[in-house]
Image (spheres, rainbow, N blue to C red):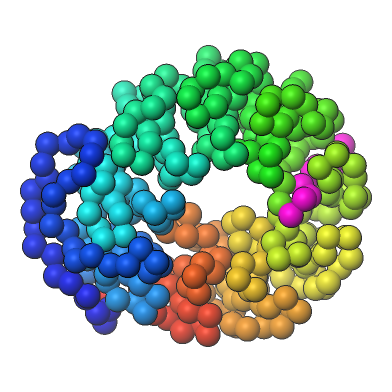
Amino acid sequence: MIRYAALLIAASLAACGSGTSNLPFTQSVSKTVALFPLRGPGGLFGYIDASGTFVIPPQFAAAAPFQDGLADVAIGDPEHRKHGFIDSSGKFVINPQFDEVGSFSDGLASVKISGLEGFIDQQGKVVITPQYSMVNEFNDGVAGVEAANKWGLIDKEGHYIVNPTFEWGPHGAGIRTKSSEGLIAVQVGGKFGYIDTKGKFAINPQFVDTDAFSEGLSAFMADNDKWGYIDRDGKIVIPATFDFANRFHDGLAAVEIGKLYGFIDRTGRLMITPQFDYAGSVDGGLSEGLAVVGVTRKIGYIDHAGHTVIPPQFGSSNEVDDWLNDWSFHDGVASVVINGKKGYINRGGKLIAIEGQ
């Protein structure tokens, strides 16, 4: 049974509006404590710490991980649901008032009002009026936005760096990724290249598909439908020979070869022999020294050398719930699925909490 660090006395929400709420949700906790969203016994979400203790008791209809010190939470039934943001004490700093929100990144978060998206700051002030049909997160001071079925790039004041010119194509949106290491993947005429944060092409459109840069490299798909890696100059540094390729983390990236996954280093050398049905978290390679791997529809973890640290035993990768986490370890904790329920384990593989208990 999960322990409760504090008891919640139900309280009615004040009228929605940005700013700080006086709702007495929980006792204060240190902002350095890592917190993780989890559904409690009554079906509502709260936040646990790394020991499995509910530090913010279950009270929300939905809850996302903390990012930039704030977490997106929602109240109300599905037809009337509104989103706001809490701090690590569980107190609302931005009251629930938005139809949808994104996580804070670069000090701003996307919000949806009446079907259009814009951005707020960490005080809840609308700094970029909702006017776009879709947006990406801000990173490196810029964000991709869609207007009239075309994508452009804006700065944090809402000024266009690049007017909406990038169109949807066979592999998705005109701006494929948020800025990563100062480069943004864009699509022109069905081919992908990269622009910098000033809107200038750093790598001309030439690839069938691409990903975000990580550790100085980005995966790309060539005309042969195989994946390889390029550097920040657009030079192919690892030839396109893989059936799929993930991002680099901790010097390794998961790649698919003949329906099995292994890991390569930044030179393309195979470091962990392909042997897994699935490998790499939602985002790519290792996280805190461990990588997700799947064998016979069960998930476990290996270390940098390929040694099994936590044997495959958890729910399959297609059950992953991005709303909670991404299977990777964060602050010594990873989200998993056990018998169809979401839970968390520590680095020893010990279950610290499972939803509904």
Near-viewer residue (51 or 327): 51
Quarter of the image where one finds residue 3: bottom left
Q: Please tell me which residue is depicted at 50% across the width and 29% down the height of the picture.
A: 156
Near-viewer residue (35 or 220): 35
The vertical placement of 273 against 232, above or below, is below
Q: Please tell me which residue is depicted at 52% across the width and 60% down the height of the picture.
A: 326
- Residue 219, percent across and down? 77, 48
Near-viewer residue (200 or 36): 200
Q: Is residue 258 visible?
A: no
Please state, as top left, top right, bottom left or bottom right, where the N terminus lies in the image. bottom left
The vertical placement of 139 against 73, above or below, is above
Quarter of the image where one finds residue 275: bottom right
Q: Main secondary structure of the magenta part?
A: loop
**Viewed as shown, does residue 37 lie left or right of 327?**
left
Is 64 contained in the magenta span? no
State the extent of the magenta-drawn residues as a range.
215-224
- Residue 267, percent across and down? 89, 60
The vertical placement of 182 against 27, above or below, is above
Q: Please tell me which residue is depicted at 58% across the width and 73% down the height of the picture.
A: 298
How many marks do you count on the picture? 0
**Viewed as shown, does residue 11 lie left or right of 191?**
left
Quarter of the image where one finds residue 194: top right
Near-viewer residue (222 or 333): 333
Please state, as top left, top right, bottom left or bottom right, where the C terminus lies in the image. bottom left
Q: Please tell me which residue is depicted at 80% across the width and 53% down the height of the picture.
A: 243
Q: Is residue 331 visible?
A: yes
- Residue 356, percent across and down? 28, 70
- Residue 341, percent across and down? 39, 68
